[in-house]
Amino acid sequence: MQIDLFVKEVSDFLDKNQILLEEDEVISYSIDRTKDFEPKGSVVLFPKTTEEVQKIVLLANQYHIPIVPSGGRTGYSGGAVASNNEVILSLSKMNQILDFDSSLPAITCEAGVITKQLQEYVIEKGFYFPFDFASSYSSQIGGNIATHAGGIRVIRYGLLRNWVLGLEVVTGKGDILTFSGKLIKNNTGYDLKQLFIGSEGTLGIITKATLLLTKKPEDSIVFFIALENFNHVIECLKIVRKSIQPILCFEVFDSSCMNLVCNKHNLNNPFNINRNNVWYVLIEAEIQNEKEEIPYSEFIELIYPISIDILYSTKDSVKKGFFRYREDISEAVAMSGRFHKNDVAVPMDVMESFIKDVRKIVIEKYKEYQLFLFGHLGDGNIHVNLLTSYDKGKEEFKKEMAQFDFDLYTLIKKYKGSISAEHGIGLLKKSYLSFSRSKEEIEYMKQIKNIFDPNHILNPGKIFDL
């Protein structure tokens, strides 16, 4: 078999501890956090250098063997799934921080560095990497970049691609490309590195990255606000934009989320509210004037008339307690029955109408499901989760959720939004790519894929089919 010949040649330059063949362990590397696909990789390889990655890719081209790049496998779109006997190329042994430059400031590291490890390293140096995800303790920097991961700080720091100063990648052809390095300004034609950010491992394998850093945020205050309806949420955001700078995050969730988190984690509603249709907002902001007894008192005065109640604190323990209600939503949903996740975005000026339409669809067509809405609303990103009991058969559940996706994405298309705000396309959403991208755009994407990966060996079947 071709795979046996491939592994034999790979063993000429990889040690035994860099090749994993045991079926049970290979299966664990064959899946990310999606549950929709049968994991079935053939072998896991653990290169330690960019040159070893290159040799693997060149051999894969020679034998026409597909490769699935693998990071922390924390994604929700099937982007790291190996389901067709692919070779899995794990970056986990390429985990060194290579350079720190306080003058830029910037840090250069290998792709397999754990996100939290990098964050802690730069904080010790007096700086800050401003991207924090629920998966930071297991996600890897290369995967963050390849999926263009988001998180709660986008409203303050912008998108991850703006913080990627340089990349080293091995293309699907086996070429090693090095982009930009430490140059802030480089106006010499197309910025090709941007193509690899968010490409989900379909164009090349990221092996190194140079990332810009910033100063650590000052002390912060967190406001926890209960609001009567979603219109007041939008008004709250408008007031925040005018009266608070800088905002670190603006998170929102509905009363269904609050009730479920309180129930599953034995918490009390801090507002002592027992009714539904309430919306909750968490706002974190840097404190600019430490002499103020109550920071942003003007904001409190402006927001008070439209709020049910306002809580706020500058104490770390209290702030962490506030954020539990938002951070524990996904876990609470996951432990409550059969659940289905969607990560979408629409323009802010139509968000209220969009949410009304989503609720209408669920009420009219999915009566056996509970709807949970939450997300990073400050950047137009909302998570749409549905939950039903385990009494619902698995196949029936999958069929109904496929229909729900079609209904939801049809709505997204109507509102000129995105079917994926931060989780990517992968295997899970590729059938719906045309709901957010034009036929012409998709054709150009395919042509770009053909340039960098002409034999289609890198993460085949992800984003679109060729």
Image: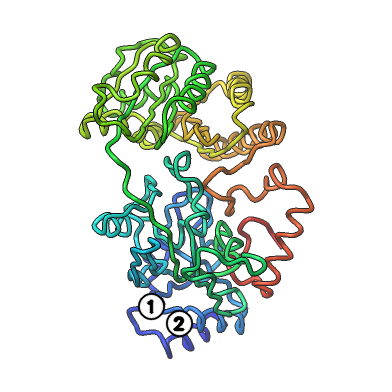
Compared with residue 334, is residue 190 higher up or lower down, i.e. above or below?
below
Q: In this figure, which residue is indicated by the disc labeled 2?
A: 52
Could you tell me which residue is drawn at 60 percent across and 20 percent down? 356
Along the line of sight, which residue is nearer the eye, 8 or 174?
Answer: 174
Crowding at dot 2, Cα within 10 Å, few <14 / some 14-19 / many 20+, comes out as some
Q: Residue 166 got which mark?
A: none
Query: How far from the left and from the top, in percent, is residue 285?
Result: 36, 33
Residue 254 in sight from this viewpoint: yes
For the view shown, which residue lies furthest in the bottom direction?
A: 12
Q: CA distance from mark 2 to mark 1?
A: 7 Å
Q: Where does the N terminus fall, quadrant-wise?
A: bottom right
The kind of secondary structure element at disc 2 is: helix
Query: How far from the left and from the top, in percent, is residue 216?
Result: 31, 48
Disc 2 residue type (three-letter)? Glu
Q: Are marks 2 and 1 in contact (CB under 8 Å)?
A: yes
**Left or right: 350 as drawn, with respect to 441:** left
Compared with residue 303, is residue 154 higher up or lower down, i.e. above or below?
below
The kind of secondary structure element at disc 1 is: loop
Query: How far from the left and from the top, in percent, is residue 2?
Result: 57, 82
Compared with residue 139, is residue 278 higher up or lower down, i.e. above or below?
above
Q: In this figure, which residue is indicated by the disc labeled 1?
A: 48
